[in-house]
Image (spheres, rainbow, N blue to C red):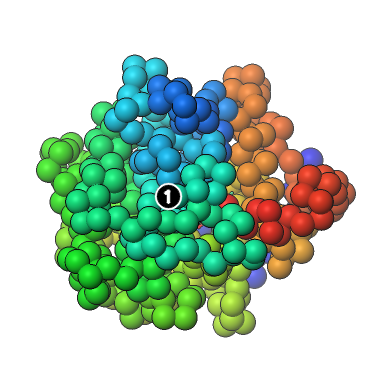
Amino acid sequence: MTLKRFPNAANVSAEILGEPLKFPNGRVAPNRLMKASMSERLSTYAPEDPKKHGLPTEKILNAYEKWGNGQFGMVITGNVMVHPTNLEAAGNAIIFQEGDSSERRSLFTQWAQKTKQDGALAIMQISHAGRQTSVTVNPTPWGASDIELKTDPPGSRYGKPIGLTTDQVKTEVIDRFVYAAKYAYECGFDGVQLHGAFGYMLTQFTSPTTNKRTDKYGGSLENRNRVIMEIYDEIKKEIPVSSGFLVGIKTNSKEYQDEGTTVEDAKAFCEAYEKKGFDFVELTGGTAEKFKFEHERESTKIREAFFVEFADVIRPVFKNTVVYLTGGFRTVGAMVDAVQRNTTQGIGLGRPVTAEPDLPKKILSGSVPSAVQDAFNPNNIIYQIMASVSQIEEMGRNSLEKSGGNVMDQISDFSDEQVVAGFEEKLAKMFGGNAKKTVEVEA
Ligand SMILES: Cc1cc2nc3c(=O)[nH]c(=O)nc-3n(C[C@H](O)[C@H](O)[C@H](O)COP(=O)(O)O)c2cc1C
């Protein structure tokens, strides 16, 4: 098949993207390209049976075998949940003490191995959905406070959160992140990324829109950031520094909410992460109430990355912590430009690498100038996200061997208008023409 690609305005060498990135603890990512976290929703869902709940499946292993042959510097898993009843979606992989078993350990170990086979660092994203737990999974999830997410109609998608007591912040949040991080380490992952973006539990603490607490976890910026700092400290206590295990965080550069965290707040949070010793920070933006996987301003379109202007503001705080920027990168020209301007050190790629799991290999060898350009209406973010969900499932159907060594095996070509038309028709049927409401949040 002939894939259509984004036009690459600046025809430059990709050489700089192939440079290794060194982390403060001495670990090295072989190049600057990173697979961003994307929820696979391919794990088991069995809430009544802890041992069978949230187990990664063969499909996940197959998909990561393909990314693991794509020549990434770093590969981040989709959100692995740390709480069995506070899920981003049914089908998330989960790590929790009550569900521990040799089967779970073996599956996560294979996941790490598949991911690292061509030298990428395998990083597990660990997350807690809190109030962004689907109502069908749990009508009463935890929240930093009991502030319900606004949906239309109210209560249609998410449960009504119960505000955590001070003791529960430890037992239902901190301890669970730490347990999952240690598990990831024991299963051979090179590090974890705390999901501190898009309105999930850690952002429910950092954002004044969702944190109305009056204890040490609420109020000042320092207090709202405390839960993240304590998770970091506890992880460091559990995992020997000599192991080189990396701890990073994905954080919003801006929340896009009235009274939400501003870019100046984000800068202050990042300053704290740098001081604390985080190995890497991935900058992004938005929440489930304000979804931002697209351009808001004309000025950022030229540089492709949605949050590039915020990254420029935040960047100076990072001296040792390695910074990645994710969202919008499609051409080698824009990626190289962002690195050369020192806006970021690493480039995160989401949707482009579900269309093409070996995009880094092709970019670094100079054989392609850009990502595949899908034929969706650029404003229809929901369909684009569903397309990526579908491509991840397609990647998972066969092992690399069964795919004849071809990482592109089975993956739909959404640069083909007819394929897009067929997909849109299928979605419209599935959701009764109301896909936008039904699939509000995928991240
Ligand atoms: C299908 C899908 C699932 C996603 N799931 C997650 C997730 O689990 N955790 C996360 O931090 N971001 C998630 N994201 C957001 C991506 O990591 C990335 O920030 C976003 O897609 C913008 O990057 P892009 O323009 O390169 O796609 C998801 C995105 C997509 C398309």
Picture quadrant where residue 370 is located = bottom right
Picture quadrant where residue 315 is located = bottom left
Percent across and percent down for residue 31 are: 40, 49
Left or right: residue 111 compared with residue 405: left
Percent across and percent down for residue 278 are: 23, 56
Percent across and percent down for residue 435 are: 73, 55
Task: Name the kind of residue labelled 1 in the image.
Answer: Pro
Image quarter of the N terminus? top right
Please tell me how many numbered marks the rendered image carries: 1
309, above or below 326, in the image: below
| Residue at image location 24% in from the left, 74% down from the top | 219
- Secondary structure state at the residue bearing disc 1: loop
| Residue at image location 40% in from the left, 26% down from the top | 50
| Residue at image location 49% in from the left, 44% down from the top | 138
Left or right: residue 107 compared with residue 42: left
232, above or below 182, in the image: below
263, above or below 46, in the image: below
Percent across and percent down for residue 386 are: 67, 49
Left or right: residue 377 compared with residue 130: right
Foreground of the two, 265 or 378: 265
Q: Which residue is mark 1?
A: 141
Is residue 346 visible from the viewing direction of this image? no
Left or right: residue 62 compared with residue 385: left
